[in-house]
């Protein structure tokens, strides 16, 4: 653990926030446990950008929102929080890297903007990726880098994932500019590309600019729709605008999903409290519901 009193206070507060009561020793098992507690406690959500409030990714702003006010956030906030905690635990070479999102993006569409942020760290000479902020299909475990395809596969109770060299992703070169590896998930019997990561170092301003675009641009989906997700031991719970889905996984890897549409701001507020564990009393649920309703109408008009 870090020696500074403030760092110890941060780690204690973070552990309390995620309900982790284990050791802070930087073992792989402890890191995996911290990640599991994080993804089951702190939701992915975009209430700030959706309601016109740009996201501040300064360390203390992230702590204030996700830890002190018991809110969720999106990738820049989750990666900032997890990387700070791992560094305080004494994990080595903890780095955040920008990436491009390919989930459900047709091949040949060109390189999407670098709008995702994920964390990479070292343990006993092996590099791993850990992510708490990718949303509904967030990898539910630690993923090793630079392994052969068969060795890279990690099967979890919430899906099967792997990290591969970008050349194995099956995309045109113009789609994967400055991408080093691809995070994939098994979906419908095949490997689907989730996001690619650029392992080059980031300047702080790189993250500032990407975060500013994601949280303020009207062309970015985070400002014009609602997106929530959280994990349990056996479920992925997601909200896409007003559509709430609870996908439950069986021991054999199969899953079933229950869906319903939220009918008003009160239902959105209650689902956010009960399922997504958002406890911030300052949220304007009427404004948030209006965003989701508007996005639903826009999607219906395009069908």
Image (tube, rainbow, N blue to C red):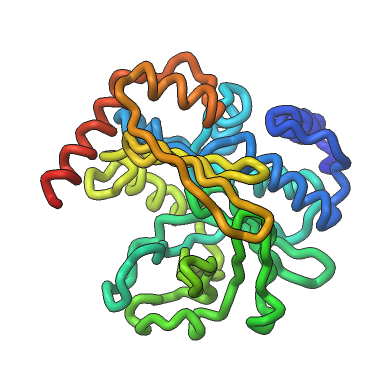
Q: The N terminus is located in which quarter?
A: top right
Residue 122 rendering spot, x and y as whole percentages: 75, 64
Q: Give the camera-side residue of 196 and 192.
A: 192
Residue 167 rendering spot, x and y as whole percentages: 49, 85
Direction left: furthest residue: 301
Residue 286: quadrant of the picture: top left
Residue 118 rendering spot, x and y as whole percentages: 56, 56
Residue 39 rendering spot, x and y as whole percentages: 62, 43
Residue 5: quadrant of the picture: top right
Residue 45: quadrant of the picture: top left
Task: Report whether 51 appears left or right of 72.
Answer: left
Does residue 256 show up?
yes
Please say if 160 is above or below 270: below
Residue, x 46% and y 68% (percent of image)?
A: 188
Task: Report whether 43 appears left or right of 155.
Answer: left
Residue, x 80% and y 64% (percent of image)?
A: 123
């Amino acid at each position: 653990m870090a020696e500074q009193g403030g760092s110890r206070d941060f780690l204690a507060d973070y552990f309390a926030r995620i309900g982790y009561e284990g050791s802070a020793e930087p073992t792989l098992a402890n890191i995996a446990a911290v990640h599991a507690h994080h993804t089951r406690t702190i939701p992915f959500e975009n209430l700030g950008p959706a309601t016109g409030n740009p996201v501040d990714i300064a360390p203390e702003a992230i702590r204030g929102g996700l830890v002190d006010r018991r809110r969720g956030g999106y990738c820049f906030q989750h990666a900032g929080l997890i990387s700070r905690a791992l560094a305080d635990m004494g994990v080595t070479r903890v780095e955040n890297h920008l990436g491009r999102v390919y989930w459900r993006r047709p091949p040949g569409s060109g390189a999407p903007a670098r709008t995702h942020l994920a964390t990479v760290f070292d343990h006993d000479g092996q590099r791993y990726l850990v992510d708490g902020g990718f949303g509904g299909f967030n990898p539910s475990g630690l993923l090793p880098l630079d392994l052969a395809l068969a060795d890279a596969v990690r099967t979890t109770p919430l899906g099967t994932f792997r990290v591969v060299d970008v050349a194995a992703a099956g995309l045109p070169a113009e789609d994967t500019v400055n991408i080093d590896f691809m995070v994939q998930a098994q979906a419908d019997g095949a490997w689907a590309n989730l996001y690619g990561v650029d392992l080059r170092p980031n300047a702080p301003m790189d993250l500032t600019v990407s975060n500013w675009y994601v949280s303020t641009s009207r062309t970015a989906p985070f400002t014009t729709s609602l997106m929530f997700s959280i994990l349990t031991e056996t479920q992925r719970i997601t909200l896409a605008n007003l559509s709430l889905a609870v996908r439950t996984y069986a021991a054999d890897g199969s899953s079933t999903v229950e869906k319903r549409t939220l009918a008003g701001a009160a239902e959105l507020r209650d689902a956010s409290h009960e399922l997504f564990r958002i406890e911030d009393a300052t949220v304007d649920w009427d404004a948030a519901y209006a965003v989701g309703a508007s996005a639903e109408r826009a999607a219906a008009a395009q069908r």
